[in-house]
């Protein structure tokens, strides 16, 4: 691991809450509102960690472990990404499966925590979350397959590092499709419009938010920070595909990464400003469309 990669990892951990803040600020400006400050999530996290935690008598250790497992799985998953555009802190052939598995583990822990409350309302949200994951996870693997074919490497360090930069001149169309597919996947995995509305309070439309209704205090802070880190993590995937940084110097590669994360956050805010939330029955169609883009990317490389 390079020194720049270590610095980028630390910066990403500290600045992850800024990404959803930029999304909210962009959406507010485009809809004619002042909106919350970009750093609002930091204030919310500080307030939550100073509060106590309330547990229902019906919950078990599964509920208490959920937020910790969610955050831990995301932190470990981040170690597989080459933040400096060259080499990830942890890398081995086939680590893309471990990366996807860690994301699935975090979702599984959160769903179990929601079900552990015994609430049918949270059970409904957990069911919807898993339904969306059923379509999102195959899409992620199709994107990875396209990247493997383009780079000839089975590790994320190769798929998003130097081999990717060399693959763009001959597989640019395919990689562009993969990048768009990953952006749609970012919206779905992070419960953003048009898949879900993180600001909604309508009981029948809530998906992610309903699962965490019973969490409070530091536990809720872990979940909120984990959500911000997950958004930044998928943003790194999108930026890495569209802007290979292996040819840049270390500091320049890190600067381009975080500038790209800002652009991705603004793009998410624009999408949330111009689109309405889809009906639940239309969400699978959106994700199947994203999977089709990745599949077309694969077909282009096979021919």
Image (cartoon, rainbow, N blue to C red):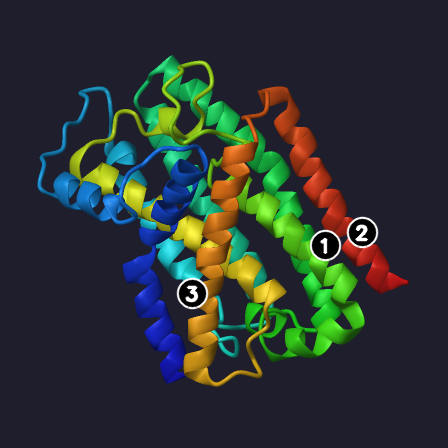
Disc marking residue 258: 3
Q: Can you give x and y, in whole percent of width and height, for residue 208 in the image? A: 42, 30
Disc marking residue 177: 1
How far separated are the C-alphas under marks 1 and 2?
Answer: 8 Å
What is the count of numbered marks?
3
- Looking at marks 1 and 2 on the same chain, the residue that comes earlier in the sequence is marked by 1
- Looking at marks 3 and 2 on the same chain, the residue that comes earlier in the sequence is marked by 3
Residue at the far right in the pictured view? 303
Disc marking residue 230: none
Look at the numbered disc 2 and give the secondary structure of its residue. helix
Q: Quadrant of residue 112?
A: top left
3 vs 2, front mark: 3
Look at the numbered disc 3 and give the secondary structure of its residue. helix
Residue at 38 percent of width and 21 percent of height: 122
How far separated are the C-alphas under marks 3 and 1?
Answer: 22 Å
Residue at 66 percent of width and 34 percent of height: 286
Q: Can you give x and y, in whole percent of width and height, for residue 80 in the image? A: 47, 66
Q: Can you give x and y, in whole percent of width and height, for residue 72 in the image? A: 33, 53
Q: Would residue 37 be found to the left or right of residue 229 on screen?
A: left
Quadrant, the N terminus: bottom left
Query: In terms of depth relative to the viewer, which is nearer, 204 or 31?
Result: 31
Q: Can you give x and y, in whole percent of width and height, for residue 242 in the image? A: 62, 64
Residue at 46 percent of width and 59 percent of height: 261
Disc marking residue 296: 2
Q: Would residue 232 be found to the left or right of residue 85 on screen?
A: left
The answer to the question of whether label 3 and label 2 lie on touching residues, with beta carbons closer than 8 A, is: no
């Amino acid at each position: 691991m390079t020194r720049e990669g270590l610095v980028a990892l630390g910066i990403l951990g500290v600045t992850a809450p800024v990404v959803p803040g930029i999304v909210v600020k962009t959406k507010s400006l485009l809809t004619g509102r002042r909106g919350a400050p970009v750093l609002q999530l930091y204030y919310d996290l500080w307030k939550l960690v100073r509060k106590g935690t309330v547990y229902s008598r019906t919950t078990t250790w599964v509920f208490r472990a959920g937020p910790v497992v969610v955050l831990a799985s995301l932190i470990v998953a981040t170690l597989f990404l080459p933040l400096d555009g060259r080499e990830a802190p942890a890398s081995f052939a086939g680590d893309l499966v471990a990366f996807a598995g860690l994301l699935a583990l975090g979702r599984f822990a959160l769903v179990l925590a929601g079900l552990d409350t015994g609430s049918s309302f949270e059970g409904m949200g957990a069911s919807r979350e898993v339904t969306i994951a059923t379509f999102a996870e195959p899409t992620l693997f199709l994107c990875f397959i396209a990247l493997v074919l383009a780079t000839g490497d089975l590790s994320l360090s190769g798929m998003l590092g130097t081999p990717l930069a060399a693959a763009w001149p001959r597989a640019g169309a395919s990689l562009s499709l993969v990048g768009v597919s990953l952006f749609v996947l970012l919206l779905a995995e992070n419960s953003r419009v048009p898949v879900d509305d993180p600001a909604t309070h309508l009981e029948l439309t809530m998906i992610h938010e309903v699962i965490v209704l019973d969490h409070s205090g530091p536990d809720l802070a872990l979940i909120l920070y984990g959500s911000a880190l997950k958004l930044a993590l998928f943003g790194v995937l999108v930026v890495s595909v569209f802007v290979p940084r292996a040819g840049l110097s270390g500091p320049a590669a890190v600067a381009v990464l975080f500038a790209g994360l800002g652009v991705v956050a603004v793009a998410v805010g624009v999408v949330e400003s111009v689109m309405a939330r889809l009906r639940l029955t239309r969400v699978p169609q959106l994700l199947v469309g994203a999977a089709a883009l990745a599949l077309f990317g694969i077909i282009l490389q096979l021919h």
